[in-house]
Image (cartoon, rainbow, N blue to C red):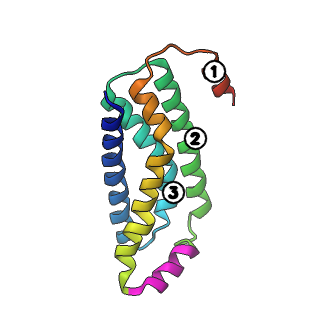
Amino acid sequence: MNVLITFFIAAIIIFTYMTGLFVVALMRKDNSIADIAWGAGFVVVAWGTLVVTGDFFPRQLLTCSLILIWGSRLSTRIFLRNRGKGEDPRYRKWREEWGRCFIVRSYFQVFLLQGFILLVNIAPVLIINTTSDAKLVLLDTLGLLV
């Protein structure tokens, strides 16, 4: 599969994921869900693109497994930290400052902007999921140890 196609698929996954989160945030009146879902977004995109490419080579499985561990840990940690505290003060402040424009601005400045940043950050994983068919080598082991 072509790397550009993988990026396009990742962009669709991210857009759908972030838009769904935005709808949940609107219903809950709490944009803090964006922080909790940040780590899980990496997991969704990494595994989603791996499944779409149809390849399950060792380097791809290792990378996606590490993303699963890291993303799950991050989302769980932020969820536990925020539980029962209501909306994060940053988002409350924006809710007041933005007034009538809050819904549109939060969609673009909170959810879609984070989605774009997620796409940029996960680019190396997308390249691995598209092009990596080699067996694991010493550098993979060193990366795992790090």
Within 10 Å of disc 3 (Cα), the crowding (few <14, some 14-19, many 20+) is many
Closer to the N terminus: mark 2 or mark 3? 3
Residue type at numbered disc 1? Leu
Q: Give percent across and percent down for residue 80.
A: 59, 57
Which numbered circle lies on residue 70?
2
Image quarter of residue 69: top right
Classify 4 as above or below 120.
above
Image quarter of residue 113: bottom left
**From mark 1 to mark 3, how far is it between C-alphas?**
32 Å
**Position of 127 compared to 11: left or right?**
right
Which numbered circle lies on residue 36?
3
Residue type at numbered disc 3? Ile
Residue at x-position 36% and y-position 43%: 10
Classify 76 as above or below 24.
above
Disc 1 target residue: 139
Closest to the observer, 53 or 31: 53
Dominant secondary-structure state across the stretch colored magenta: helix
Closer to the N terminus: mark 1 or mark 3? 3
Closest to the observer, 35 or 127: 127
Closer to the N terminus: mark 1 or mark 2? 2
Residue at x-position 58% and y-position 70%: 85
**Element on which disc 2 rests:** helix
Image quarter of residue 132: top left
Residue type at numbered disc 2? Trp
Q: Which residues are magenta?
A: 89-99
